[in-house]
Image (cartoon, coloured by chain):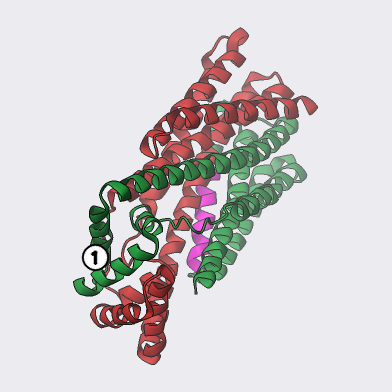
Amino acid sequence: MAKKKHQKQTMEEKLNTLRAGVLGSNDGILTVVGVLVSVAAATSDRFTIFIAGLSDLLACAFSMASGEYASVSTQKDTEQSAVKNERHLLKTDFESEVAAVKDYYVSKGVTPETSLAIAKDLLNKKPLETVVRVKYDIELGHYLNPWDAAFSSLFSAAAGGIFPLCAMTFAPSAYKWYAVILAVVLTSALTGYISSKLGNGLVKIAVIRNIIIALITVAIHYGVGRLF
Amino acid sequence: MTKKKMSLAQRVNVLRASVMGANDGIISIAGIVIGVAAATNNSYSILISGLSGTLAGMISMCMGEYVSVSTQKDSQKMALISERQRLSDQYQKEFDYVQKKYEAQDIDPKLAKQATKELMDKDALSTVVQERYGFNPRYFTSPYAAAIASFISFPTGSILPMLAVTLSPANVRIFATAIAVLIALLITGYCAAILSKSDRLKGSIRNAIAGLLTMGVTYIIGQLLAH
């Protein structure tokens, strides 16, 4: 087994996780509001609407979390099988490993001579890390903890979905649609704002885009619900 | 070489997306119908909730994909603009940055410098953007294959719990759905493990447990609210 020190995530990776979380909240908002609107357009029974919305909120959060858990764990498995493969290849076919590393640097734009020198240098110093990085784009021991990934998406999806659900449940009957739409628009705008602040700073575009997307989603669901 | 690597990355991406999509469809719709079935006996309510959930899942997946792709495109555009500026203001600093990155891979400093010089002479912008932001402005990976894959697999997965809950007799509805879903999750977990060459047993059991947990939680909540 390779020595697996659990390296700390870089700042960039942390930001990525955070941004993924914000986008996950957006997913939660859109799914829950979708269920609320289409169920409510089909039936006026408030209990059914509420139960459907709540079940969807939980189901969405859990399925996202378990999907995230599975995909991060799969990455880990992929890494393990890559390491096994390469360890074997390094023993049996060292020349082709040198060539693979050389090709990698050539494809980046380094001249063949320098690439070859780099390949020899690296395969001398840390052969396994190098081939795994070059061939599979995996940094050894540099993966997320699957539980972290699962909890952060569970939390973010649930956090997003709770707003429209609360608006639906607690607003007075006469205003409930306005309340739901308002809640969705506000939370979508907020997720757009946060994600663009974390990312690239194009705040206005992101906020407007998210609001429009949310309104389109509500409209589609309303239309479909009316068909039932 | 580059081409081969791209298609591998893309394949993994599409694979991941369709597995996650189908799983998502099965687990989340199972969660919804079981939650609602635990709270009410009304078949119409159960069916409506399941259908709405499927639709909502598909639409939010679409919209979510669109938002994340556009966000990424925006970030990449901004990265190019600011990097172009930095290259003209402080070329040497950018050069050093790339060299440091290469040295961090444990390449001999002399070789790292040589490689950096070659790269920067050839295409300074692509090189620095690649090292700083991790994407290559010359290749854009199309996200649509992955999006389409999950858009198809999500409703496909959701059909199963809906059929199970609709077709089975009312008194065993929840139990039958849970069994059908567990079997399906074992299968998808197994397929995913084959495709990604990972541990099959672990993959399928992990998947089934996730489904069981989801259905359990929504069942309990549904039961609590029913009384």
Q: Quick one: quadrant of the C terminus of chain A?
A: top right
Please name whichever residue, A45 or A107, is drawn nearer the observer in this view of the structure. Answer: A107
Q: Main secondary structure of the magenta part?
A: helix
Does any portion of residue B95 appear in the rendered image? yes
| Residue B218 appears left or right of A137 | right
Chain represented in red: A
Q: Position of residue B221 (x, y in %)?
A: 52, 33
Please name whichever residue, B7 or B181, is drawn nearer the observer in this view of the structure. Answer: B7
- For mark 1, does the 10 Å Cα neighbourhood hold few (<14), some (14 to 19), or many (20 or more) residues? few
Q: Which residues are magenta?
A: B201-217
Which residue in the rendered view is the most extreme toward the right?
Answer: A227
Q: Colour of chain B?
A: green
Q: Chain of mark 1?
A: B
Mark 1 = which residue?
A: B104
Please name whichever residue, B189 or A82, is drawn nearer the observer in this view of the structure. Answer: A82
The amino acid beneath tag 1 is: Ala
Which residue is pictured at 68% across the width and 47% down the height? B155
Q: Quadrant of residue B189?
A: bottom right
Asked if the stretch drawn in magenta spans residue B206, the answer is yes
